[in-house]
């Protein structure tokens, strides 16, 4: 085989976001670890000039899902990591960065397949997202089922979606959540249940019932605890 020409090791490129995500997730904690795990997780990708014109999204209304390539803008690091500790493995086992979907990665690029609910000039309405509010998006590509769905694919590190845990409600918290749901006109109760059922707590923490957790979804703070191991109980849903 002919030798490959030498590659410059100092090449660098700059990329510019084509838009930013307005997301139901206002902080990293409690965002599902992959897209599609919380179908009620909604957001809007707001495109910036010149991509905010109807021409740029023409045809996209024929597509059910898109790939988003984005920047983990709240996890960018100067020093590259070769190994990471995926939360999925309990946070105490390290793997090569390229064997994981960790946010700590060279160039800080993430990718998610999300449902495209509606297409407008300058705006894509999305669901099933795993993206933080303000996430810069670098590119959008239509999901192509015949090429992107790999029937015999396997991944022995992440064979199946994480097991779900039961989510219970204090009566008062459910009333609060329903009130905010009506005000926001968003499926807040389902969103809370879908996100908390993923058990957002770091795997190495074994919290007693006295330990409270919280996360912000839309403009409300959701508070919960673990009354028994493996069960979440929502305690309050309060406007931030
Ligand atoms: N699906 C993407 C991928 O595989 O590249 C993301 C996977 S990553 C494990 C998902 C986590 O990234 C979420 O749970 C959230 O905590 C975090 N995240 C989402 N958007 C982010 C952002 N803009 N900056 C930093 N972290 C972010």
Image (cartoon, rainbow, N blue to C red):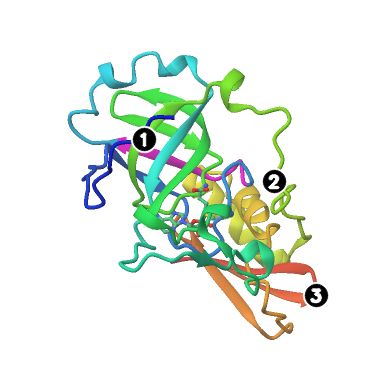
Check if mark 1's residue and mark 3's residue have beta carbons within 8 Å: no
Proximity of marks 2 and 1: CB atoms separated by less than 8 Å: no
Asked whether 188 falls inside the magenta stretch, the response is no
Closer to the observer: label 2 or label 3?
2
The answer to whether 52 is drawn above or below residue 227 in the figure is: above
The residue at the far left in this view is 50
Can you give x and y, in whole percent of width and height, for residue 181 in the image? Answer: 55, 49
Q: Is mark 3 within 8 Å of ligand 1?
A: no
Near-viewer residue (164 or 160): 160
Badge 2 or badge 3: first in the primary sequence: 2
Q: Quadrant of residue 146?
A: top right
**Residue ID for mark 2:** 155
**170 on left or right of 130:** right
Residue at left 49%, top 48%?
A: 183
- 169 vs 139: above or below: below
Report the disc number at residue 3: 1
Q: Is residue 72 above or below residue 113?
A: below
Query: Which tag, 1 or 3, sits closer to the chain's start?
Result: 1
Spatial separation of the CA atoms under disc 2 and disc 3: 28 Å
Q: State the SS at label 3.
A: loop
Q: Could you tell me how far apart the alpha carbons at marks 2 and 1 are, in whole angstroms? A: 33 Å
Apparent side of residue 209 relative to residue 122 in the rendered image (left or right): right
The reply to whether residue 138 is in sight is yes
User: Which range of residues does the magenta coloring cover?
Assistant: 38-46
* Residue identified by numbered label 3: 229
- Give how far across and how far down residue 119 sits, in percent: 40, 24
Mark 2 or mark 1, which has the lower sequence index? 1
């Amino acid at each position: 085989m002919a030798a490959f020409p030498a590659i410059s090791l100092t090449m660098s490129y700059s990329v510019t976001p084509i838009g930013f995500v307005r997301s139901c997730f206002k902080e990293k904690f409690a965002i599902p670890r992959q897209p599609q795990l919380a179908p009620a997780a909604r957001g809007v990708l707001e495109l910036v000039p010149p991509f905010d014109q109807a021409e740029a999204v023409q045809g996209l209304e024929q597509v059910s899902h898109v790939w988003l390539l984005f920047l983990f803008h709240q996890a960018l690091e100067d020093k590259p990591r070769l190994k990471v500790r995926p939360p999925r493995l309990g946070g105490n086992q390290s793997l090569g960065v390229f064997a994981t979907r960790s946010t700590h990665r060279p160039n800080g690029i993430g990718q998610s397949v999300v449902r495209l609910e509606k297409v407008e000039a300058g705006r894509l309405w999305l669901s099933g997202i795993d993206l933080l509010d303000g996430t810069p998006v670098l590119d959008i590509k239509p999901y192509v089922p015949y090429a992107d769905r790999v029937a015999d694919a396997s991944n022995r590190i992440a064979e199946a979606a994480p097991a779900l845990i039961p989510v219970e409600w204090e009566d008062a918290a459910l009333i609060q959540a329903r009130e905010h749901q009506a005000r926001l006109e968003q499926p807040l109760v389902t969103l809370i249940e879908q996100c908390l059922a993923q058990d957002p707590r770091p795997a190495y923490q074994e919290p007693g019932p006295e330990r409270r957790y919280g996360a912000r979804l839309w403009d409300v703070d959701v508070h919960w605890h673990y009354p028994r191991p493996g069960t979440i109980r929502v305690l309050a849903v309060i406007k931030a």
